Amino acid sequence: MIRAYLDCNATTPVRPEVIDAISAALVRAGNASSVHAAGRAARAALENARAQVAQLIGAKPSGVIFTSGGTEANHLALSGAARSRILVSSIEHPSVLEAVPDAERVAVDGQGVIRLDALDAALAGDNRPALVSVMLANNETGVIQPVAAIAEIAHRHGALLHSDIVQAAGRIPVNLGALGADLVTLSAHKLGGPQGVGALILAGEQLLQPMLRGGGQERRRRPGTENLPGIIGFGVAAKSAVAMPDAARLEGLRDALELGVQAIAPEAVIHGAGAPRLPNTSMIGLPGAEAAVQVIALDLDGVAVSAGAACSSSRQAPSHVLQAMGLSATIAGEAIRVSLGWTTTEADIGRFLAAWGRLAERARILRQGAA
């Protein structure tokens, strides 16, 4: 069966140039902390990748801390900043929400955009040293947050700002200076790189307490022998993503998909469509059809999508993002996420619409029978 892979926000297929770079790295000897020739060559490759990742968002290479992925980077930011007070938006990724379960949550509006007035009031009401964590683009709806405005509010109150930019980097323009965040999180496998490698990037020289103790790697901010093949692949993926070659094409495909959905089923809802969004992401609600049922039916029809974040979709719980936007658990439980990537074609969109159209017709029949 020819399959349509439309779950790129969970993980994007690895780019061919990344596979080649990792394959070459795997046959090379050398630990980047060793002083002999092989070690020096490994160090040079590591630092080249560090520069490539930094260039993606206009950061300084010295601020790049390589980690095992976005989850570790988020934990390192929230714990390492050593702030007594943590505030997060209510639509953050589980790796932020569960890193500090008792963090104060800031509300969002009906489109999933953080309420700046609520953040301002929360920071004004307590003068303890704080860290605010707000993602740049939501992994489920694709809604883009006004991070520069959030940074202004946070800094005015003496707070640091961390932003998980995992879904945004390489899909929309991101410049660390313009963003205003003090710390940002990246993950290679959202860019067409390998799984198991990410980075926390510091905008300045702020202190960061490591979560682990050991060697002096990553300037003692993240000890442990670096995953050199993964990091090299991360660098190549970042270099390929700098020009965002797929952004306009993917936006056209996403728009065609959403027009097709609304033509098939006018009752369908595109969540977050009233706010700026990533060009590759669509969260579609189909009344009367549970998300898990949709995902399974589409998979059987050769189309891969998800019911939200891959990290939490196995729990079969309604989207916490949509519920934070004010939707009921029932409506939130009827939404699927379609996310496009560099491998997506017009034919994939056609396959999705054909398969989803059959789902929509079955849901319509069931609703009429229940009426």
Image (cartoon, rainbow, N blue to C red):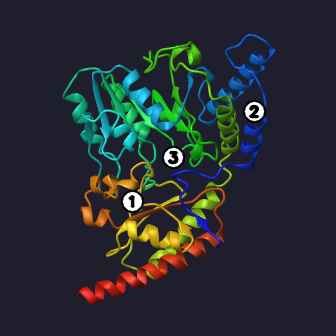
Q: Residue at x 33, y 39 (%)?
A: 97
Q: Quadrant of the C terminus?
A: bottom left
Residue picked out by circle 2: 25
Camera-near label (2 vs 1) is: 2
Q: Position of residue 132 (x, y in %)?
A: 34, 32
Asked whether 160 or 179 is in front, the reply is 160
Q: Position of residue 213 (x, y in %)?
A: 47, 15
Give yes or no for contact between labels 3 and 2 (Cβ–Cβ under 8 Å). Answer: no
How far is the residue under mark 2 from the one under mark 1?
42 Å
Secondary structure beneath dot 2 equals helix
Residue picked out by circle 1: 272
Camera-near label (3 vs 2) is: 2
Say if 291 sits above or below 230 in the image.
below
Q: Is residue 69 visible?
A: yes
Q: Residue at x 48, y 32 (%)?
A: 184
Q: How many marks?
A: 3
Secondary structure beneath dot 3 equals loop
Residue picked out by circle 3: 167
Q: Residue at x 41, y 60 (%)?
A: 307
Q: Amino acid at mark 1?
A: Gly
Q: Residues within 10 Å of mark 1 (few under 14, many from 20)?
A: many
Tell me which numbered mark, 2 or 1, is placed earlier along the sequence.
2
How far is the residue under mark 3 from the one under mark 2?
26 Å
Say if 344 sits above or below 197 in the image.
below
Q: Amino acid at mark 3?
A: Gln
Asked whether 367 or 28 is in front, the reply is 28
- Quarter of image, res 293: bottom left
Of all residues shown, which one is farthest toward the right?
37
Tell me which numbered mark, 1 or 3, is placed earlier along the sequence.
3
Q: Position of residue 70 (x, y in %)?
A: 49, 37
Q: Residues within 10 Å of mark 3 (few under 14, many from 20)?
A: many
